[in-house]
């Protein structure tokens, strides 16, 4: 669902990233749920979407996302897509 939100969601890239993050939240995944080989990718995504540990605890998207450069937003969207593709390749 997160990848679908990025691909065909309405709004600009920042709005779609927020929507994708909301979809990731519904999975109720914790850092420890991510296989070790993908943890670096997950940490990059989560640290890009949240500004500090409290954001990760409450699962609130960073207010700084509205100020994030479009190129960085695209890189983040690609990272989410790549991680979801990798995870879908596993039998979780």
Image (cartoon, grey):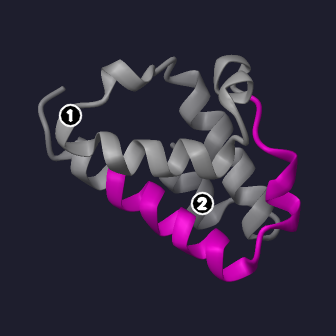
Q: Nearer the viewer, residue 67 or 90?
A: 67
Q: Quadrant of the C terminus?
A: top left
- Tag 2, which secondary structure? helix
Q: Spot the residue most to the front.
A: 52
Residue 6, numbered label: 2
Q: Measuring 46% from the left and 55% from the top, which residue is drawn there? A: 80
Q: Which residue is mark 1?
A: 36
Query: In the rendered structure, does residue 74 fall within the stretch colored magenta?
Result: yes
Q: Measuring 53% from the left and 54% from the top, which residue is drawn there? A: 4
Q: Position of residue 37 (x, y in %)?
A: 18, 42
Segment tinted magenta in the rendering: 60-83
Per the picture, the main secondary structure of the magenta-coloured stretch is: helix
Local crowd size for mark 2, using a 10 Å CA cut-off: few (<14), some (14–19), many (≥20):
many
Q: In the drawing, does residue 71 fall left or right of residue 84?
A: right
Say which quarter of the image contains residue 90.
top left
Local crowd size for mark 1, using a 10 Å CA cut-off: few (<14), some (14–19), many (≥20):
few
């Amino acid at each position: 669902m997160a990848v679908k939100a990025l691909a065909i969601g309405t709004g600009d890239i920042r709005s779609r990233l927020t929507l994708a993050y909301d979809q990731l939240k519904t999975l109720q995944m914790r850092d420890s749920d991510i296989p070790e080989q993908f943890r670096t990718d997950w940490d990059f995504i989560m640290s890009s979407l949240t500004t500090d540990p409290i954001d990760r605890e409450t699962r609130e998207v960073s207010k700084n996302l509205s100020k994030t450069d479009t190129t960085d937003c695209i890189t983040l969207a690609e990272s989410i897509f790549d991680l979801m593709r990798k995870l879908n390749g596993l039998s979780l």
